[in-house]
Amino acid sequence: MTMPALRRVGVVKQVAKRAAKMIAALWIATALVAAPAFAANTKPATVVIDNFSFSPAQLSVAAGSTVTWENHDDMPHTIVNDATPREFKSAPLDSGEHFSQTFTKPGTYKYFCSIHPHMTGTIVVK
Ligand SMILES: [Cu+2]
């Protein structure tokens, strides 16, 4: 290849790189604009289990939201609704595992860990 041809390849590469950056920026901008309309008030919420407690202990979400519990402890824990009939109950979660529950009906949902019943939490669905 002659020198001008090499230079041309370099320019083409630069243009392609710039185009890729612009597409990425556009994609992010589109996602940011679209996200609030899509998520409305039902954005995903997380409760972290750490040091034998649920954090936050009380969480308020809009009806339709999905709450995910993440076990950051080295101990297994469960998430069991404290109501009759029971609305939700997880299997024991090992360290790093998670459990998700979608709340469609407004109300106050108390829960506890069946392995360590002193661990309690509340989800308030509005
Ligand atoms: Cu536990």
Image (spheres, helix red, strand yellow):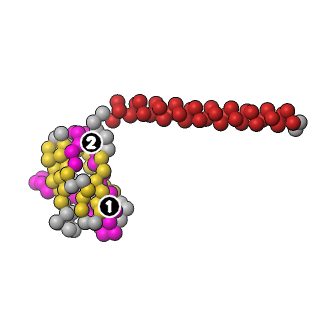
Residue placed most toward the observer, 107 or 30: 30
Taking the spot 20% from the left edge, 68% from the top edge, the residue there is 116
Q: Is residue 94 visible?
A: no
Residue 32, picture quadrant: top left
84 lies left or right of 100? left
Taking the spot 65% from the left edge, 36% from the top edge, the residue there is 17
Q: Secondary structure at mark 1?
A: strand
Taking the spot 44% from the left edge, 34% from the top edge, the residue there is 31
Q: Secondary structure at mark 2?
A: strand
Q: Is residue 27 above or below residue 46?
A: above
Span of residues in magenta: 59-87
Q: Amino acid at mark 2?
A: Ser
Instruction: Determine which residue is flagged by label 1.
Output: 71
* The residue carrying mark 2 has its beta carbon less than 8 Å from ligand 1: no
Mark with earlier residue (2, 1): 2
Instruction: Determine which residue is flagged by label 2.
Output: 65
Dot 1, crowdedness within 10 Å: few (<14), some or many (≥20)?
A: many
- Residue 52 lies, in percent from the top left, at 25, 66
Q: Does residue 82 show up magenta in the picture?
A: yes
